[in-house]
Image: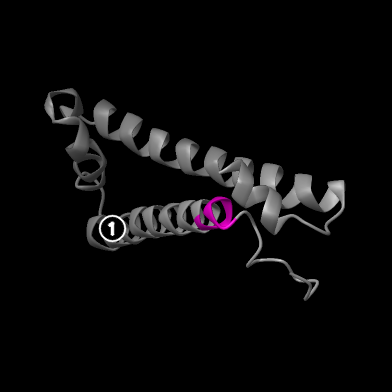
Amino acid sequence: MGVFIARISRGRSIRQFLLRVILIPTVFSCIWFATFGTLSTSARINGADLASLPTESVLFGTLAQHPLERPLSILSVLLIISFFVTSADSATFALGMISEDATSTRTSGRR
């Protein structure tokens, strides 16, 4: 992952790097965990037995306790899919760059 981030951050200032690679994902993650932590806590307070569910079902068990279950479930699945796709894409890009010794990704035109 570090190779990928280094490659896409080339030519940016340290301020831009910190904002786009460190700060924005951290803020988004905090919002995500705070939101879903609050949803599961309120579901637990209202009597849902989430602890008895298998680990992979807790998210959907939490969402089943709220009126917007269907749209939130669809949104969650789409976000999970986009996470796996972007992770695989960045890993493939980094592995390709390493195996080619970064010769095919140079932008200077010289080889």
Give the residue at the far top of this rendering: 51
Q: Front-most of 6 and 108?
A: 108
Give the residue pinned by disc 1: 68
Q: Is residue 75 left or right of residue 22?
A: left
Residue at image position (18%, 39%) is: 57
Q: Is residue 51 left or right of residue 71?
A: left
From where the camera sits, is residue 24 visible?
A: no
Corner quadrant of residue 53: top left
- Is residue 5 inside the magenta stretch? no
Residue range corresponding to the magenta coloring: 96-100
Q: Front-most of 80 and 58?
A: 80
Give the residue at the far bottom of this rendering: 109
Q: How many marks?
A: 1
Quarter of the rendering occupied by the C terminus: bottom right
Residue neighbourhood size for the residue with mark 1, other residues' Cα within 10 Å, grouped as few (<14), some (14–19), many (≥20):
few
Tell me if residue 93 comes above or below residue 31 in the rendering. below
Tell me if residue 92 comes above or below residue 55 in the rendering. below
Q: Front-most of 67 and 72?
A: 72
> Picture coordinates of residue 61 (x, y %)?
19, 41
Residue at image position (70%, 49%) is: 6
Magenta: main secondary structure equals helix
> Picture coordinates of residue 51 (x, y %)?
18, 23
> Picture coordinates of residue 29 (x, y %)?
53, 41
Residue at image position (58%, 56%) is: 97
- The three-letter amino acid code for the residue at tag 1 is Leu
Q: Front-most of 11 and 13?
A: 11
Q: Is residue 70 left or right of residue 94?
A: left
From where the camera sits, is residue 79 visible?
A: yes
* Disc 1 element: loop
Quarter of the rendering occupied by the N terminus: top right
Residue at image position (70%, 43%) is: 23
> Picture coordinates of residue 33 (x, y %)?
46, 37
